[in-house]
Image (spheres, coloured by chain):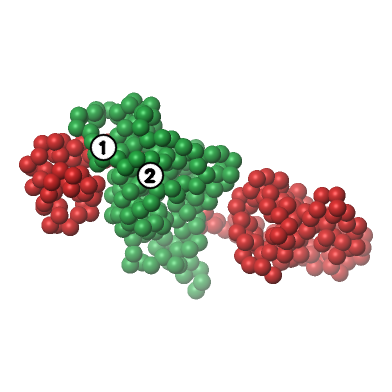
Chain colours: A green, B red
Amino acid sequence: MAVKRLQARRRRFQEVALPHLNALYRTAWQLVGEDAAPDLVQESYLRAWKYFDTFDAGTNCRAWLFRILRNVWITNWQKVRLELPLTEVEIEQIEPYYDWEDEFLREELTAEVKGALSELPEDYRMAILLADVEEFSYRDIAHIMDCPIGTVMSRINRGRKMLARLLRSGGEYPAGPKRKFARKPETEKS
Amino acid sequence: MNCPEFRRVLDLYVDGELSPEAAAAASVHGSECVSCKRTEQELRRLRLIVKDAVIELHPPSGLAGKIQQAISPSRSRVNIAAIAAAVLLFLSTAAMSGMPAVRASLANRMEQVAFHLDQPRTLVLEGEIVCRECELFLQYGSPVERDVKGHHGGLKTSEGKIWDFMESRASEPLIHDESLIRKRVRVNAKLYRRAGCLEVISYQILQST
């Protein structure tokens, strides 16, 4: 009986959770790099499997998995936080809204975009990936990142502005917002 | 909707987060203002470029199989685990009841089996922070010379084992902060059984006792 239940659980997990492997992997790749991404994804899936009974079948499995991925990532990331200063960018001035009007976005920017993404603070990077690549709603992103929707909006907006500046400047961080090392990443307010 | 209003809601607009009425107003403004329209188009292109750059990443071919395997333990792995558990149970029972000479021998074998099975791995342990030297004094009457270096924190788990912490910035309070003595903690650490040592990744104070 128990074996049948386990088999049914495993079958359901394979049907609803494993199809999101690609999405989790590409986000993990952007968060921890190519070498560590498989481990992060595998550990996330193992944790999802462990707590699969708590997953509400009526809810968004992809968002649930991304939330787990973020939690596992934070656990790993905290390990290095004690050893390495975190890069956090503090926007010290209120900026205007999007201010580009020239067409700076060329084609064939894949490598530059990946490089520029890696320059963003982790929370901004993740918010942008969840919005632009995975096309989650702000509400889902808030759930995944465990923060208010206002914070999601702020992270997406600031992240995109920084990304645009990085792409415009060819990867060199331009003058303007001051860059500052900080221990805690949660400096922006919603 | 005017230009500042349009640009204030631009992220929400391109991300489809505006109400239908607000989206319609933004659309009207975009059709009337060349500058704002261009900004909107650039933002949409930025989103697309990000997506194109990231979407092409695919997991290594063996990853799905590894995950499948991890959630579907094979018969052989189950059997090895069951056999190992049975051997350990037998050895521990024998060790408790055997003659002293045999007990030492069996204890060594138990350790060998444990070492063989154990790989340093990350896990979560709960226990109580105790002073290693004071515990040795309490349990065995060993001499304590705390005036040399003060208390030295270790993690006492429910089976009575005291784990050492590897010295690091993460473990420093657990070892040297005397106010943590007798506190219950949950430690996320890599366990080195052979050395009886924990490499602390993070920890959480649970409660005072």
Location of residue B152 with respect to A159 vertically, above or below: below
Which chain is disc 1 placed on? B
Considering depth in this image, is A31 or A124 the residue closer to the camera?
A124
Q: Which residue is mark 1?
A: B46
User: At x 17% / y 57%, what residue is drawn?
Assistant: B19
Q: Residue extending furthest front? A: A93
The quarter of the image holding the C terminus of chain B is bottom right
Amino acid at dot 1: Leu
Q: What's the distance in space between the residues labelled 1 and 2, CA to CA? A: 15 Å
Image quadrant where residue A157 sits? top left
Assess disc 1: are there few (<14), some (14-19) or many (≥20) residues with their C-alpha within 10 Å of its C-alpha.
many
Which chain is disc 2 placed on? A
User: Where is residue A125 shown, x and y percent of the image?
Assistant: 38, 43
User: Where is residue A146 shown, x and y percent of the image?
Assistant: 41, 57
Q: Residue extending furthest bottom? A: A1
Considering depth in this image, is B102 or A118 the residue closer to the camera?
A118
Lateral position of residue A155 relative to residue B6, left or right: right
